[in-house]
Image: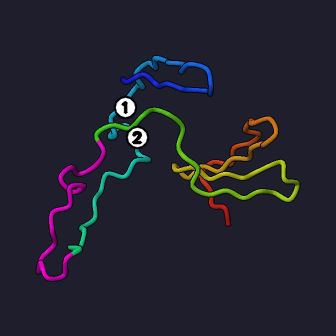
Amino acid sequence: PDPVWQRLLPSPPNIYSLPPAPLQPVESNPAVPTHTTPCPSPDPAAGKASVNPAQLRPGPRFRMAGIPRVMEYRLLNNKRHVLVRDEAGYVALWDLTTGQQLQSYGLANLA
């Protein structure tokens, strides 16, 4: 991969070489949707749907390894704790001051 560089004025740029990120096949990660939806033509005079480049590949080939992204959250009244629902549907309680997960509630809704 290309190196990442950072510059803090007026010093010269710092260049860091990053190791390649491990990729895992999408089939091994059920949290990644692999479906596509038809895209209507932006030109109504075209008469039929145009080809969307995103539809040429049925889904992502690889997904970078990591934790599922945050989809929904609720900040509690004490402003220190937050309930988080991730992309896989799991709900957890986090402490914002320490950055640690305090408790996991499994698959749940934040209603």
Residue farthest to the right?
78
Choose mark 2 or mark 1, whichever is in front.
1
Find the magenta span and give its range. 43-60
Q: Label 2 vs label 1: CA separation? A: 8 Å
Q: Residue 47: x, y in percent?
A: 11, 80
Q: Which mark is residue 29?
A: 2
Q: Which mark is residue 108?
A: none
Q: Which mark is residue 24?
A: 1
Q: Residue 5: x, y in percent?
A: 49, 24
Task: Tell me which residue sits at (69%, 47%) in the image.
Answer: 92
First in sequence, mark 2 or 1: give its number.
1
Task: State the image quarter where residue 111 is shown.
Answer: bottom right
Amino acid identity at mark 2: Asn
Task: Tell me which residue sits at (41%, 45%) in the image.
Answer: 30
Rendered view: 49 above or below 89: below
Please, what secondary structure does the residue beneath circle 2 have?
A: loop
Task: State the image quarter where residue 76 is shown.
Answer: bottom right
Task: Tell me which residue sits at (40%, 25%) in the image.
Answer: 22
Magenta segment includes 31: no
| Quadrant (top left/top right/bottom left/bottom right) for the N terminus | top left
Task: Tell me which residue sits at (67%, 51%) in the image.
Answer: 84
Compared across the picture, whether 82 is left or right of 67 comes to right
